[in-house]
Every structure is written in C-alpha cells, then in structure tokens.
Amino acid sequence: MAIGAIAAIVVVVGIIIVGAMEYDRRRKRAVFGPEFDILVQQEGSPRAADRELSRRRRAYSQLALRPLGEEERARYTQDWRKVQESFVDDPVTALNDAEALVVRLGRFRGYPGGSHEEFLELLSIPHTSAVAGYRDAVQVRQMTEQQTQPPSTEDMRQAFQKYAALFDDMLAGAVTDNGPQHTQSSDSRKAPTLETGP
C-alpha cells in the first residue's frame, strides 16, 4: 500500500514539474515570441535559451539609450517616408535604404556599433514582436544581392512592411523627456505597391 502511495506521489510531482516547465515555456514564448523558439533551436534547450535571454537583458540594461527630440523624430519620419516612396520605382534600393535607416536610428539611440547579430540581440529585448520580422526582412534583402534566386516582388513588399514595423516600434520606444510621446502615424506600415499608372 505504501509503495502505491509513493508511486502516485511521484507521478503527481512529475506531472506538476512537466506542467510548470510547459507553463514557463509558453510564458516565454508569449513574451519573446518567435525569438524564444529561435533561441531554443540555436542554444539547444529551453534552459540554455533562458540563460541567453538573461544575458541579453543584462546587456540591454547597461545601454544608455538616448530619447529622440521632436526635431529628430520628425527627421527620421521624413527620411522613412522618402524610403517608402522610393519602393515603387526601385524596391531593392528601398530595402537597402530601409535597413540602413533602421541601423542608423539604432546607432543614434545608443545601440552599440558592433556586429549586426549583437544589434539584433539587443533589439530583441524591447522590440520582441518586430525582431523576428526584421530577421526575415534582412534575409529577403540579402537575397536581392544573389543572382541565383532573387526574391519576388511580393516577398520584397512583405519585407519592407517588416522593416516598417520595426522602425515604427523603435520610434514609439524613443520617448522624449520634453513632453508627451508622439508615435509615428501608421503611414509607414502601409504596404508600398508596385502598381503603375495608366
């Protein structure tokens, strides 16, 4: 009888542990989205992915990010509109310009100028939902440089939208100390089209 009770307790404890681990994984997936799944795959386990996220959080907390003033915000917004307008005539150049503008905004705010991967890692903390799309957009942009299999126009359009999502998120996070935050209008999220006039 005692062996049966011990076995039942062991089973219940096992179920509780597995349930707690699954809850923790779902919670992290909800917070970090696809980035958590990418880390699990890269690092080999959820525990290793959690350690990597902790390292990123510590590195991010050490950054001295500067807020954008109204003039700076207006300048970046205008620069983005120019890039967006250029998509219709030259989507490849527009993707390259979108990448450059996202990086320039990040550097201006105080993200380190090291490797692109380090930039992505630090962006993944405050801009979790947009970073996975940004990774996809970078891949599409890099495909434009290859002669073997260039991306379709639709792939480039979607990549541009993903750049826009991160850019909007970065501007929205650049709160100033001089007054209320003014987020960018949703114009930058509108997908550029390659429709030509009559």
Image: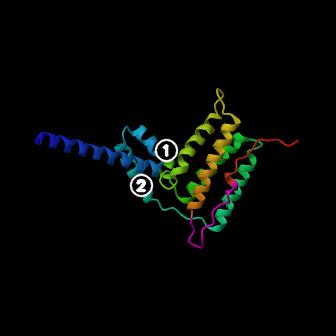
Q: What residue is at 62 percent from the left and 56 percent from the top? A: 168
Q: Position of residue 68 (x, y in %)?
A: 59, 64
Q: Pick the residue in front: 167 or 20.
A: 20
Please give the residue where the numbered disc 1 appears in the rendered image.
34
Q: Is residue 180 magenta?
A: yes
Structural distance between the alpha carbons of marks 2 and 1: 17 Å
Q: Position of residue 47 (x, y in %)?
A: 34, 44
Q: Is residue 148 above or below residue 74?
A: above
Q: Is residue 10 above or below residue 74?
A: above
State whether the magenta stretch is mostly helix, strand or loop.
loop
Q: Is residue 173 left or right of residue 185?
A: left
Q: Name the amino acid type tagged 2.
A: Arg
The stretch in magenta equals 175-187
Q: Residue furthest bottom?
A: 178
Work out which quarter of the rendered image holds the N terminus and state it.
top left
Q: Position of residue 11 (x, y in %)?
A: 23, 41
Sequence-first tag of 2 and 1: 1
Please give the residue where the numbered disc 2 appears in the rendered image.
57
The residue tagged with tag 2: helix, strand or loop? helix
Q: Residue furthest right?
A: 198
Q: Is residue 59 left or right of residue 150?
A: left
